[in-house]
Image (tube, coloured by chain):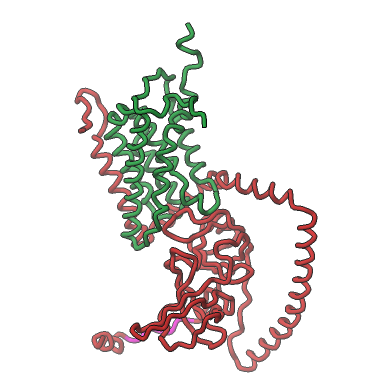
Chain colours: A green, B red
């Protein structure tokens, strides 16, 4: 598979700083809304169980690369929306997203220092921890452990990190090539 | 690692403060939902707002199935048509017998001065998507309060009981399958007439018939049908077939595993069965003076 279009490539070097066009709030809202639609996509049973949580991933992206643009409140409200749509316990996703936001804001400078490979590891850790929160909440409420497939979405989500990085940046890249002059 | 901005920039409350505030808020919501079921209206409001997004999300799969429908072969249509016609013929014969039996039953019940059986309404519905929440076994169907569905109604398919409506939204409702861990169905074994309650196991698609004594008259292959004594499920609908009976004298109860008769995980079209609105009065509670000494004895 040719992955050369991925800028930066999946390497251990820190990605070079790119000059991006300013990010407008409607664009952030659009990405989060698209993540919500993709999260609510009706899929066959097995795929539903391992589908990565794109809202979590998109939130991490905005917090890490454009800090202070997305606050706790939109993340928390999106969490409530996911709770209603999934029919899970009210506040479960909201709590998980609050934890995720906290970790992402706390570590965003650290994550920026690393190359794509190490970033994937960091993202996987954050996603796993937020899933552990959900697991803890549900098991406290009396549910059984749903099986090892429960943790697959975190790893899949982390694997999607370079892709998401590039897709979100497509409209943000300058229209003219800065090196062309 | 402490993330503290210089004090001369005004940046609102600190990260830890915001995190604590939102986690506390979530915890309050979690406890009030799990313990007290308070947030029904709040949930309804959000559900109404999310509904368009949910429909948008289920659009691709609907489109795919429509396109699939379009490319059905002539032979398959012909075969289905023949099959349905034969079934219709058989059903209509059974229906004629049923009608005469119904009138006879009605007549006999009148003679014996028993309560007449109440005819129930059906609302056909389609399953939109399966369980997203990995901890429970639920499906979402495309009928809600706007179509007259109420929480607590039974859901059946052509082979038997699928589940029960547990949460209704304006245009959608959530059906908890009988294989869910917290879902219980009162049943009666057809062969022996034994009454009991089946519970879902949760992790696989089977049911468990609990609290049956070791010497209970239950065999492999026994058909279990709804007993109807709960007023939710109409009597006589197939629920499950006993697949394994383990009798160990060391335990008080036998371990009885059953497989559901309905396509609990595979059905696409289901019927929502309206519950009895007129139930007989609950028997009056015993007077406290009579029940108190009994509690002490335990």
Q: Which residues are magenta?
A: B281-287
Horizontal and vertical percent for residue A103? Answer: 29, 39
- Identified at 62% across, 73% down, the residue is B120
Q: Quadrant of residue B161?
A: bottom right
Q: Relative to B157, is A89 on the left or the right?
A: left
Q: Main secondary structure of the magenta part?
A: loop
Which quarter of the figure is the C terminus of chain B placed in? Answer: bottom left
Q: Nearer the viewer, residue B66 or A3?
A: A3
Q: Relative to B225, is B101 on the left or the right?
A: right
Q: Nearer the viewer, residue B225 or B222?
A: B222
As drawn, which residue projects farthest toward the front? A1
From this view, report whether residue A179 is shown above or below residue B266. above
Horizontal and vertical percent for residue B280? Answer: 51, 81
From this view, report whether residue B155 is shown above or below residue A137. below
In this orientation, does residue A26 appear?
no
Q: Nearer the viewer, residue B265 or B171?
A: B265
From this view, report whether residue B88 is shown above or below residue A4. below
The number of callouts visible is 0
- Identified at 38% across, 28% down, the residue is A11
Magenta stretch holds residue B68 = no
Horizontal and vertical percent for residue B129? Answer: 55, 54
- Identified at 28% across, 88% down, the residue is B294
Which quarter of the figure is the N terminus of chain B placed in? Answer: top left
Horizontal and vertical percent for residue B270? Answer: 61, 63
As drawn, which residue projects farthest toward the bottom? B112
- Identified at 45% across, 81% down, the residue is B282
In this orientation, does residue A65 appear?
yes
């Amino acid at each position: 598979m040719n992955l050369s279009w991925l800028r930066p490539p999946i390497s251990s070097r820190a990605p070079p700083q790119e000059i991006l066009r300013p990010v407008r709030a409607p664009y952030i809202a659009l990405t989060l809304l698209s993540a919500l639609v993709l999260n609510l996509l009706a899929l066959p049973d097995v795929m539903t169980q391992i589908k990565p949580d794109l809202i979590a991933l998109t939130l991490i992206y905005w917090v890490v690369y454009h800090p202070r643009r997305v606050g706790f409140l939109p993340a928390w409200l999106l969490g409530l929306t996911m709770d209603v749509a999934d029919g899970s316990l009210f506040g479960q996703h909201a709590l998980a997203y609050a934890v995720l936001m906290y970790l992402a804001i706390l570590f965003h400078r650290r994550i920026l220092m690393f190359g794509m490979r190490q970033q994937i590891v960091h993202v996987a850790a954050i996603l796993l921890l937020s899933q552990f929160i959900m697991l803890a909440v549900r098991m406290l409420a009396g549910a059984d452990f749903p099986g090892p497939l429960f943790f697959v979405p975190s790893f899949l989500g982390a694997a999607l990190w370079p892709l998401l990085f590039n897709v979100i940046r497509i409209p943000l890249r300058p229209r003219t090539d800065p090196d062309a002059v | 690692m402490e993330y503290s901005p210089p004090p001369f920039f005004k940046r609102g409350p600190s990260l830890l403060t915001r995190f604590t505030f939102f986690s506390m808020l979530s915890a309050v919501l979690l406890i009030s939902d799990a313990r007290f079921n308070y947030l029904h209206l709040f949930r309804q409001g959000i559900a109404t707002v999310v509904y368009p997004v949910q429909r948008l999300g289920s659009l691709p799969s609907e489109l795919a199935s429509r396109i699939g429908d379009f490319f059905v072969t002539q032979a398959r249509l012909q075969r289905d048509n023949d099959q349905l016609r034969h079934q219709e013929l058989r059903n209509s014969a059974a229906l004629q017998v049923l009608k005469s039996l119904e009138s006879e039953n009605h007549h006999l019940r009148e003679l014996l001065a028993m309560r007449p059986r109440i005819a129930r309404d059906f609302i056909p519905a389609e399953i939109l998507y399966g369980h997203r929440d990995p901890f429970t076994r639920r499906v979402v169907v495309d009928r809600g309060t706007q179509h007259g569905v109420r929480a607590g109604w039974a859901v059946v398919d052509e082979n038997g009981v699928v589940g029960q409506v547990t949460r209704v939204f304006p245009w959608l409702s959530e059906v908890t399958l009988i294989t869910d861990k917290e879902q219980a169905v009162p049943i009666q074994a057809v062969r022996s007439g034994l009454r009991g309650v089946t519970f879902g196991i949760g992790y696989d698609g089977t049911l468990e018939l609990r609290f049956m004594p070791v010497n209970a008259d239950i065999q492999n292959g026994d058909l279990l049908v709804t007993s109807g004594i709960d007023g939710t499920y109409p009597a006589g609908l197939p629920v499950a077939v006993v697949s394994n009976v383990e009798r160990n004298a060391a335990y008080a109860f036998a371990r009885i595993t059953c497989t559901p008769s309905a396509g609990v995980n595979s059905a696409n079209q289901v019927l929502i069965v309206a519950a009895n609105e007129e139930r007989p009065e609950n028997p009056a509670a015993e007077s406290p003076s009579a029940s108190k000494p009994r509690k002490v004895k335990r």
